Image: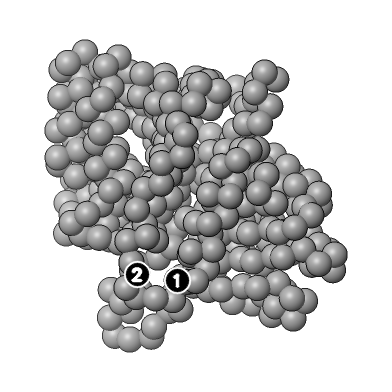
Amino acid sequence: MPMKTVFFNHLSPQYMLFASPESWISELLIDIQQAKKYIYIETFRLNEDAVGKLLYHALLDRIKDGIDIKIIVDSWGTRKTAMFDNMRNAGIKIRFFKKIVLTLALFKNNHERNHRKIIAIDDQISYIGSANFTEHSLKWRESILRIEGKITPIFKRIFLDNFQSYKKRFITRKYYKTIHYNEFDIIREKPSIGYQQTRKYFIHLINRAKKTLTIVTPYFLPGKSIRNQLAKAVKRGVTVTIIIPKNSDVKTADSLRNLYLGNLYMQGVNIQYFKNENIHAKVIMADDDLFSIGSSNFDYRSFRYMYEINLSGKNVSIASLIKEYIEDTLKNCEPFNYTKWSLRSPLQKLYGIILIPFRKLL
């Protein structure tokens, strides 16, 4: 079934929700072309491919006009190439978040990554969401919110804070505490075993729900306490729906999540598999009015080890767009099949069990 790629309401034109990277990038290129003062971009992955080069050429054109352009990319997610040298030579300021350290403990020492995805332009336009600048994910279903208005200077300040702290191992609380702005909460996560404010906020959404709760995530690896909270929500009459890809781009995460799905299903959680390509969106909606959208996956790694950012609130216009997005997404889903799940091969089950000790690293 054909899916919508852009969601908007003519009565609230300051908000647009993009499900398609192609549509989002097209709109972003227009905003870049019309920028008058600055363009700030923070992303996990910016590849030198067809998508990355579209952004590259657009930014090179604008730096000639004296626009202040700054970019933060993650050193793990983004490979340094000649494209970045060319941008630097043209005057674009680029910072690679925490360069990779080559040691025997390669993964352990490089596990805390910057997974945030925000854009701020001219104190007028901001973006927050799930998509990277990569050609290989061009056909995925994403969730990217475009906002026109006074919240943009907040995202500008967040970006500039990150731009200053991009290589610091220890940072002060001002870089990650939640920002309250009008009806919005901007939740900034930094790696923490004990604090995990994103995880705590997601639990708040689960406990706050009275009628419906929908979670859209590519990697569904909640801890036992969250799984228990989901089951309790069902018991108190909440319709809990989890939308995950039938096959994500991380097969190990799929194998591990499959261990938990049968039990959640038996406790009344409605599990829906997205059938078209991968769904990489990160959205939560409670009772059709309180939402969260941003960069955090619903898994251990996002909660414990990643620098993340999410926008939450009860803005009626945005909530309406997200509700429509979820309804459109469900049209291309199929329900979890418990019988098929229970007939998994012993090898498939064993593989998932073997992965349990690594669940916090996937």
Query: Closest to the observer: 86 or 72?
Result: 72
Number of labelled discs? 2
Dot 2 amino acid type: Ile
Picture quadrant where residue 48 is located = bottom right
Residue 329 in the image, given as x and y percentages of width and height? 51, 26
68 on left or right of 64: left
- Residue 214 circle label: none
Q: SS class of the residue under badge 2?
A: loop
Q: Residue at x 20, y 19 (%)?
A: 234
Name the quarter where the C terminus is drawn: bottom left
Picture quadrant where residue 52 is located = bottom right
Q: Residue at x 59, y 77 (%)?
A: 80
Marks 1,2: beta carbons within 8 A:
yes
Q: SS class of the residue under badge 1?
A: loop
327 on left or right of 12: left
Query: Closest to the observer: 354 or 229?
Result: 229
> Would you name the residue on which mark 1 appears?
165
Q: Going from the N terminus, do you reach mark 1 or mark 2 first?
A: 1
Q: For the residues marked 1 and 2, what is the alpha-carbon distance in whole angstroms?
A: 7 Å
Q: Residue at x 29, y 40 (%)?
A: 201
34 on left or right of 27: right
223 on left or right of 107: left
Q: Quick check: 341 above or below 327? A: below
- Residue 171 circle label: 2
Label 1: how many Cα within 10 Å (few below 14, some 14–19, many 20+): some
Q: Quick check: 95 above or below 208? A: below
Residue 237 in the image, given as x and y percentages of width and height? 21, 13
Residue 190 seen in render: yes
Dot 1 amino acid type: Ser
